[in-house]
Image (spheres, grey):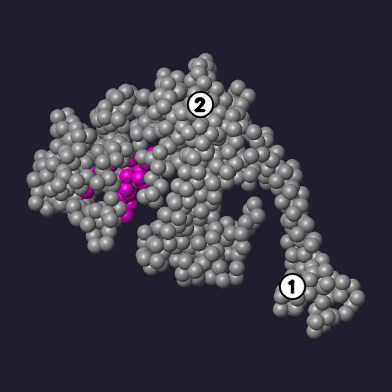
């Protein structure tokens, strides 16, 4: 097969996979809407009921509608999500918008049109984000040289170029050796470079230095990440750098500093903005004037064309049973409507001109991968695309920013969780560009090796198991424990005291000798739960709180949705309980981890994906409590080594001696 055929075949395959995943995502949402009542969907955080809305403004051609209610809104729906607005049945509505702001008792949605019914007694439901898939496909259809080059490297159809280390004077004096090396090599790489940043190693900090160094060399940077939160992280650290920073899209943490970097805000500061506002006001006034006349709806015009209506009005006569007065009214409507269209058209062109100027003058344009597909991002030409969270982004997603720049730098950790793919058939999409490139060209990467998150004893096992023992703990965190935060010693010397002592940094509660240790499956569920482990989690968390641990310092992780729900029902609301996937990129002072799987066959299911284990073990800063059945877990060599490691070096507690 020729290289060209290989390439075309890969592109065709990508398109098929995207379509499969798109269908799976929409189907999953719709199935859930069918299965759960509005109340139940609100409970799982994917709907908000009983809302009234009011239009609070316009932005970039959308109406902003603020939906609110008296009761507090607790929901997983967040800024940037696509939502469907409906009266009762979301499956019957096609009014879809984007969430732009979220408060305690309101949620603001950007909508293209606002029908009358959509302002009273409605519900808002999370909807699959179709826009993302559209942008993936549009970008693949329109691959430029840089996008094509990236894929050829990934497929091994071309060889990468040699790079060199570039000497530089760091803006951030506290960068460590591995961070400096990564920046030096990325600066000297003519095509691409990979920054491998394991847990807590200061990946974002390194990227901020790289961005500043690129700009200092006269380069224009497009900086992106898969999630809004990660983009905002970069923006936050660049705000005071003296660079011209433009944030395209919706910042999710609308702090004042971030708000001032948004394209929408910068447009209001532009010298031509007054003119733009005036055009919009004129347009609105004309619209009001137009609407005092009769709109030529089909029932009034009776088949007459616009031209015929205007001609008849000039002659002052009626036709086809339409009286002259009505013809005159409709003609007025048409004439003014033409002015309305022209005014809004002029406004749109001016808005585009302002956006072009702002983006052209920026040093760094920041956006999510998907929004890098927006036309306005293209108003600039970029020397380098710097992409964070690259190991959580599919190939179609990272290709969007790569396609817009001459060279690219990807940062991530392929030893942690890959992008989540819903469709079983489209699983290949979870193989990332970063992973493919680092396997093929390991010499085009640099690993960050000093972690600033956790106690050295918590780091030891994941470092050995997943990173060839190369990770070191920084002096500042090497020996941190809960005692530093004023957490007391438990009274007595029973088994629970062993579990809870601050100096016992890593504890494994082993359920293997208990009769009631086994997992179970709920009727009709694919997931798993383990009631004994859930009770042990509850006791451990209660014990920690009693010693003075604050609820916001604690995180509970479990791989299974059903176990998450069971544990949530037992714990106070302030304790965050999530699946592993929900904890990627985050950290807590204490983590309690329930493995769930316990059966006589030694079946581990998807615990076998060791990236999930790596993420779970690397979220805690000062204490990690593991709960599981060592005999089931030990059927897998990595888990067996984990159990042995804790037994030899740390604390193993037999759950047989624990009261629950």
For residue 297, say whether it is visible. yes
The answer to whether residue 625 is above or below residue 343 is above
Expressed as whole percent of the image width and height from the top left, the position of residue 223 reads 54, 35
Give SS at disc 2.
loop
Expressed as whole percent of the image width and height from the top left, the position of residue 656 reads 9, 46
Identify the disc placed on residue 229.
none
Residue density around tag 1, few if under 14, some if 14–19, many if 20 or more, within 10 Å:
some
The answer to whether residue 232 is above or below residue 280 is above
Query: Residue at coordinates 25% horizontally, 38% vertically from top-left?
Result: 624
Expressed as whole percent of the image width and height from the top left, the position of residue 364 reads 59, 33
Residue bearing mark 2:
158
Residue pushed farthest front? Answer: 1
- What's drawn in magenta, residue-wise? 570-596
Residue pushed farthest right? Answer: 315
Is 22 or 51 nearer to us in this picture?
22
Hey, which quadrant is residue 589 in on the image? top left
Is residue 381 rendered to the left or right of residue 435? right
Residue bearing mark 1:
295
């Amino acid at each position: 097969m020729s290289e060209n055929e290989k390439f075309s075949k890969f592109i065709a395959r990508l398109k098929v996979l995207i379509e499969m995943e798109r269908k799976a995502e929409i189907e999953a949402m719709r199935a859930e809407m069918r299965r759960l009542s509005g109340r139940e969907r609100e409970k799982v955080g994917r709907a908000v009921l009983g809302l009234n809305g009011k239009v609070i403004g316009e932005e970039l051609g959308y109406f902003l509608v603020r939906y609110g209610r008296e009761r507090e809104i607790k929901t997983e729906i967040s800024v940037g999500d696509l939502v469907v607005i409906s009266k009762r049945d979301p499956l019957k509505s096609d009014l879809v918008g984007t969430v732009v702001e979220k408060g305690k008792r309101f949620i603001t949605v950007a909508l293209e049109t606002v029908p009358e019914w959509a302002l009273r007694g409605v519900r808002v439901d999370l909807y699959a984000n179709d826009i993302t898939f559209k942008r993936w496909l549009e970008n693949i259809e329109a691959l430029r040289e840089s996008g094509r080059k990236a894929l050829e490297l990934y497929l091994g159809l071309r060889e990468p170029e040699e790079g060199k280390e570039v000497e530089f004077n760091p803006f951030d004096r506290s960068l460590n050796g591995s961070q400096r090396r990564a920046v030096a090599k990325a600066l000297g790489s003519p095509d691409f470079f990979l920054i491998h940043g394991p847990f807590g190693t200061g990946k974002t900090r390194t990227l901020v230095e790289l961005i500043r160094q690129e700009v200092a060399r006269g380069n224009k940077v497009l900086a992106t990440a898969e999630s809004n939160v990660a983009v905002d992280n970069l923006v936050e650290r660049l705000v005071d750098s003296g660079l011209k920073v433009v944030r395209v899209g919706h910042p999710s943490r609308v702090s004042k500093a971030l708000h001032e970097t948004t394209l929408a805000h910068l447009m209001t500061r532009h010298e031509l903005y007054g003119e733009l506002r005036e055009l919009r006001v004129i347009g609105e006034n004309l619209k009001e004037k137009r609407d005092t006349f009769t709109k030529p709806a089909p029932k009034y015009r009776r088949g007459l064309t616009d031209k015929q209506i205007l001609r008849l009005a000039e002659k002052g006569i009626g036709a086809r049973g339409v009286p002259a007065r009505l013809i005159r009214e409709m003609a007025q409507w048409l004439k003014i409507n033409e002015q309305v269209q022209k005014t809004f058209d002029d406004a749109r062109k001016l808005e585009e001109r302002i956006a072009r100027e702002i983006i052209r003058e920026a040093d760094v344009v920041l956006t999510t991968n998907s929004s890098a597909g927006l036309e306005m991002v293209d108003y600039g030409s970029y020397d380098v695309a710097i992409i964070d969270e690259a190991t959580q982004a599919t190939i179609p997603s990272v290709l969007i920013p790569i396609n817009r720049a001459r060279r690219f730098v990807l940062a991530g950790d392929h030893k942690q969780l890959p992008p989540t793919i819903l469709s079983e058939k489209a699983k290949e999409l979870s193989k990332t560009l970063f992973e493919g490139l680092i396997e093929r060209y390991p010499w085009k990467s640099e690993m960050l090796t000093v972690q600033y998150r956790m106690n050295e004893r918590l780091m030891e096992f994941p470092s050995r198991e997943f990173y060839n023992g190369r990770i070191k703990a920084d002096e500042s965190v090497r020996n941190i424990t809960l005692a530093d935060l004023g957490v007391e010693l438990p009274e007595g010397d029973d088994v629970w005291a062993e579990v809870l002592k601050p100096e016992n940094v890593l504890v494994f509660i082993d359920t293997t000798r208990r009769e009631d240790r086994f997992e179970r499956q709920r009727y009709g569920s694919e997931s798993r739960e383990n009631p004994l482990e859930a009770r042990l989690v509850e006791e451990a968390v209660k014990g920690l709180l009693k010693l003075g641990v604050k609820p916001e310092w604690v995180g509970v992780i479990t791989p299974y949705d059903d176990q998450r729900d069971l544990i949530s029902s037992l714990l106070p609301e302030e304790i965050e309980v999530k699946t592993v996937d929900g904890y990627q990129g985050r950290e807590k002072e204490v983590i309690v981890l329930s493995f769930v799987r316990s059966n006589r066959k030694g079946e581990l299911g998807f615990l076998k994906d060791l990236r999930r284990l790596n993420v779970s073990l690397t979220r805690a800063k000062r204490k990690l409590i593991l709960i599981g059945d060592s005999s089931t877990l030990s059927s897998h060599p990595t888990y067996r080594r984990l159990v042995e490691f804790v037994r030899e070096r740390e604390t193993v507690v037999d759950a047989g001696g624990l009261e629950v």
